[in-house]
Amino acid sequence: MNIKEIDSLIKLLDDPDASVFEAIRIKLNQLGLTVIPNLEKAWENNLDSLFQTRIENIIDDIYQNDVKNQLNQWIKTEAHDLIEAALIIAKFQYHELNIPELRTQVETIKKDVWLELNDNLTALEKIKIINHIVFDIHKFSRSNTFQNSAQSNFINHLLENRKGSPIMLAILYAGLCQQLNLPVYGVALPKNFILCYKDPHKQVFENEPNEGVLFYINPFNKGVVFGKKEIDQFIKQQKLENKAAYFQASSNLDTIILLIKSIIVYYKMNAEKTKAENYQALLKILYF
């Protein structure tokens, strides 16, 4: 459709006939992001509240459908890049995010790490370098209010404020490592999502759940390194059921599922029903 045809279609959004409005809404949704400038211009030029509300809802639907399509494409990729998924999830809430600018910020951090790494370093030495760059040079740290703030779970706020929730800090940390070909993955330990550095030469066995893991990393505590014994102690202190999953690497897909669940929990706690439902719809895509 050309611009005149789109504008003519948009003018009909104030039609009192519900069936006419629904047909127009479907058509505009099908046209996607290209019609948003036309919708925004129409919103500015028509002060009718019903007309403006309908436009706002259609714009929101178009952005959300675009993000859902991006997440569907992410699932089909082999790498399941953590940082890319975090950007998609953030855009679901903040439609007008400058994604290229956020990627540039990540690339700057990654380049700083890459310049210090070499193949002669041990796994522990590499992690010490990453900790220095991430926490000392770029000043990332824990958010002490993450349990009361959905923003702590969005990568744009982490990059802007340098503070985040346990899982958001872990996603940035592991995402950087994986892009640098370091085998660092999430571990779904309740109340404090952590990471593990995998030994690429070992397999995991049921009777030894931490087999194949060289050590664990806690990005929420400036990347401190620890072993299985500390996890055992944490499980006892928190009176948790001892599960193999608390010692093993999670897939990137499972990590992103946990991130979305964390966002949903916050919105439910704060009675933001619509936002919780929107992220529930996003979650369903990952369960394909």
Image (spheres, rainbow, N blue to C red):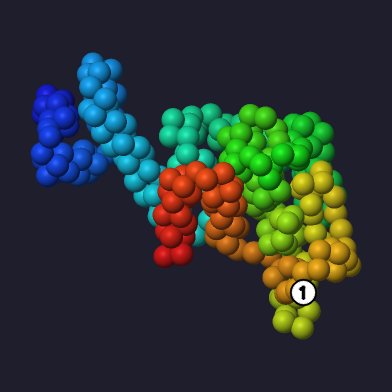
| Residue displayed at 59% across by 57% down | 258
80 or 122, which is in the foreground? 80
Count of picture labels: 1
| Image quadrant where residue 235 sits | bottom right
Where residue 82 sits: x, y (%)? 58, 50
| Residue displayed at 65% across by 46% down | 168
Question: Of all residues shown, which one is farthest toward the front?
Answer: 271
| Residue displayed at 72% across by 80% down | 205
Where residue 263 sits: x, y (%)? 56, 48
Name the secondary structure under disc 1: loop
Where residue 196 sits: x, y (%)? 75, 60
Question: Is 254 left or right of 247, judged from the image as shown?
Answer: left
| Image quadrant where residue 244 sits | bottom right
Question: Is 134 left or right of 8, judged from the image as shown?
Answer: right
Where residue 183 sits: x, y (%)? 70, 58
Question: Of all residues shown, which one is farthest toward the bottom?
Answer: 207
Question: Is 156 left or right of 137, judged from the image as shown?
Answer: left
Kind of residue indicated by mark 1: Asn
Quadrant in the picture for the C terminus? bottom left
Position above or below: 272 against 193:
above
Is any part of residue 243 visible from this angle?
yes
Dot 1: within a 10 Å radius of its alpha carbon, few (fewer than 14), some, or many (20 or more) residues?
few
Position above or below: 10 against 168:
above
| Residue displayed at 39% across by 49% down | 68
19 or 229, which is in the foreground? 19
- Write down the residue under mark 1: 242
84 or 240, which is in the foreground? 240
Is any part of residue 9 visible from this angle?
no
Quadrant in the picture for the N terminus? top left
| Image quadrant where residue 140 sits | top right
